[in-house]
Amino acid sequence: MILGAFFLSIVSLVVKLIPADSGILTTQKLFVRGLTATIILGGVLRARRISFKPGNPVLLGARSLFGMAGMLTFFLAVEGMPLAEAVTINRLSPFFVLILSWLFLGERLKKIQILAVFLGFAGVIVILRPGSIPLTLTAGLAVLSALFAGSAYTTLRALRKTDRPLLVVFWFSAAITLFFFPSVLLGGVMPDFKSLVFLICIGISGTAGQLLMTKAYRCAPGGEVAIYGYLSVVFSMSFQIIFFDSIPDAAVFIGAGLILIGGWINYRVSGKNRDGGF
């Protein structure tokens, strides 16, 4: 799980490292991310002789739609704001899962979990500091990325009854590839060698992160490993210092601390997470 969080953090780092003047579209980054995962996971499914036929196509389509929206808004947020802030705000997604599961799946929301949600959103407010700095479109995209990701994870709670995690991720990756291909075909640019290496890194790191997280949930109960996903916040802060020579200010550390505490509370009371992590 720690390795999975690390590789997924590498994705956001590389998205940020690709120069704005390279001409590489956000949709190109997403296309390569999806294409790499589709090829690798397709090979894994074939090697294991697992059918490519989805058990619940409608719900799988909804998961893919929410997932694509979440990934697009997250990539845009990473491109437009400091890395640590974008990644930390995105970690609101488990709190949105709590709320959406309560609203649409009828799952009980314990009082202590309400506190966890409050702490999570309080952490984001501290990071964004409304009133002291203007709330930008990019900040809104970061929050939306967490909402869309939470929506995708909520559909997984139902999909776990009909589809294997690897199959879900395969079709999600295939959907990303097909959806963003027209944009790449019409407006994409031929990457130079450095940008091509970065794009390949996005695809490989993203796929590795998903496979490692899947393996983690197969080897141990989700309640034992889910909390380690929050290490992505620590990784992103370290990357911001190392690669961008920028130390997050006190508000980011305080806000991240509130989100981490809320995540730890939710981890302690949620019990076994059976949705495969993504």
Image: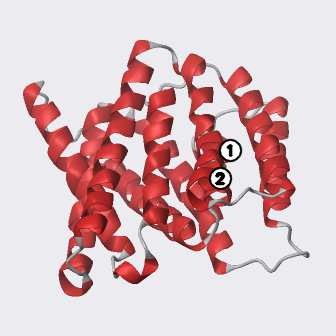
In the picture, measured across the screen, residue 29 lies left or right of residue 262, that is left
**Of residues 94 and 17, the one drawn nearer to the viewer in this rendering:** 17
Q: Is residue 109 above or below residue 170?
A: above
Q: Which mark is residue 238?
A: none
Residue found farthest to the bottom: 186
Write down the residue under mark 2: 241
Nearer to us: label 2 or label 1: 2
> In x, y percent, where is residue 52?
14, 39
Give me the C-alpha separation between circle 2 and circle 1: 27 Å
Dot 1: element:
helix
Residue found farthest to the right: 131
> In x, y percent, where is residue 185?
18, 80
In the picture, measured across the screen, residue 70 lies left or right of residue 264, that is left
Q: How many marks?
A: 2
Amino acid under disc 1: Phe
Write down the residue under mark 1: 95
- Residue ID at (20%, 78%): 190
Residue 84, quarter of picture: bottom right
Residue found farthest to the top: 220
The quarter of the image holding the C terminus is top left
Label 1, residues with CA under 10 Å away: few <14, some 14-19, many ≥20: many
In the picture, measured across the screen, residue 107 lies left or right of residue 56, that is right
Residue 102, quarter of picture: top right
> In x, y percent, where is residue 107?
64, 34
Q: Earlier in the sequence, mark 2 or mark 1?
A: 1
Amino acid under disc 2: Ile
Dot 2: element:
helix
Q: Is residue 112 above or below residue 248?
A: above
> In x, y percent, where is residue 109?
74, 35
Q: Is residue 243 above or below residue 72?
A: above
**Of residues 245 and 87, the one drawn nearer to the viewer in this rendering:** 245
- Residue ID at (65%, 79%): 137
